Amino acid sequence: MASSAEVVNEEETTESPAALKREERLRKFRELHFKRNEARKLNHQEVVEEDKRLKLPSNWEAKKARLEYELIVDQKKKECAERGEDYNRVKLLEISAEDAERWERKKKKKNPDPGFSGYAEAQLRQYQRLTKQIKPDMDNYEKQREECGEDFHPTSNSLIHGTHVPSKESVDRMVDDVEKQIEKRSKYSRRRAYNDDADIDYINERNAKFNKKAERFYGKYTAEIKQNLERGTAV
């Protein structure tokens, strides 16, 4: 007859695989539960961050980068001031030749001439071009100030209108500028004048342009057919 110790050992050996499987399933379940909570927390954080980004202005990223750059520049200026150095000179020393060339190309393309778009825009470009060419002559300024005295800053009682005589250099500079304008204006293409005696073979402006293109490319091949049609002798 088997003893009680042997019976207990047999029960433990038969129950241990089932207990191990149950423990393994519980462990996996706890891991999945932990991962789910972790994913839920991360999703909530992303939703909060996205909501903050949507509430910010549309140009917030550019403005933030600009503010960070300004802080860096201010810090570098303070460091240069403490060392007794010129910040602009130090900044130029840090710029490579490739960056300098790229900035120069970008500067040239920054204000291209868009052509004629209106008289107001053309007048504004002309004004900006002329003001950029102005080079103040401080000696002449002081000389005129001494000659005019109190009338240098005229009031309603001042009578200096028409008394100013420009210098020869100023007149030559104006003449050169006018000649450059005439030369530049001569290169512009003008609108073709309308010919009242020309044959009307179109029904609108678009059709007239099409007929001109067709005549330019195929006119020499269809000249005889066109003449026969006009004479009424076409076969």
Image (cartoon, rainbow, N blue to C red):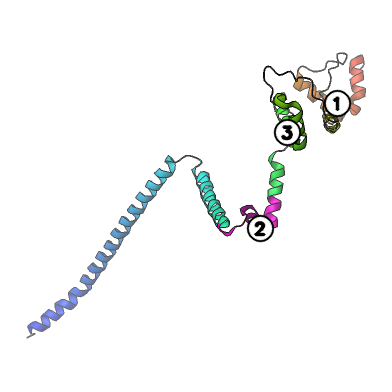
- Magenta segment: does it hold 93? yes
Secondary structure state at the residue bearing disc 2: helix
The mark lying in front, picked from 1 and 3, is: 3
Pick the front one: 35 or 154: 154
Residue picked out by circle 3: 131
Instruction: Identify the main secondary structure in magenta.
Output: helix
Give the amino acid type for the residue marked by disc 3 in the picture.
Thr
Q: Which residue is mark 1?
A: 215
Which residue was labeled with disc 2? 93
Q: Nearer the viewer, residue 187 or 215?
A: 187
Q: Nearer the viewer, residue 14 or 33?
A: 33
Work out whether 142 lies above or below 196: below
**Which segment did they paint magenta?**
82-102
Q: Earlier in the sequence, mark 3 or mark 2?
A: 2
Question: Which image quarter holds the N terminus?
Answer: bottom left
Q: Earlier in the sequence, mark 1 or mark 3?
A: 3
In which quadrant of the rendered image does the C terminus lie? Answer: top right
Amino acid type for the residue under numbered disc 2: Leu
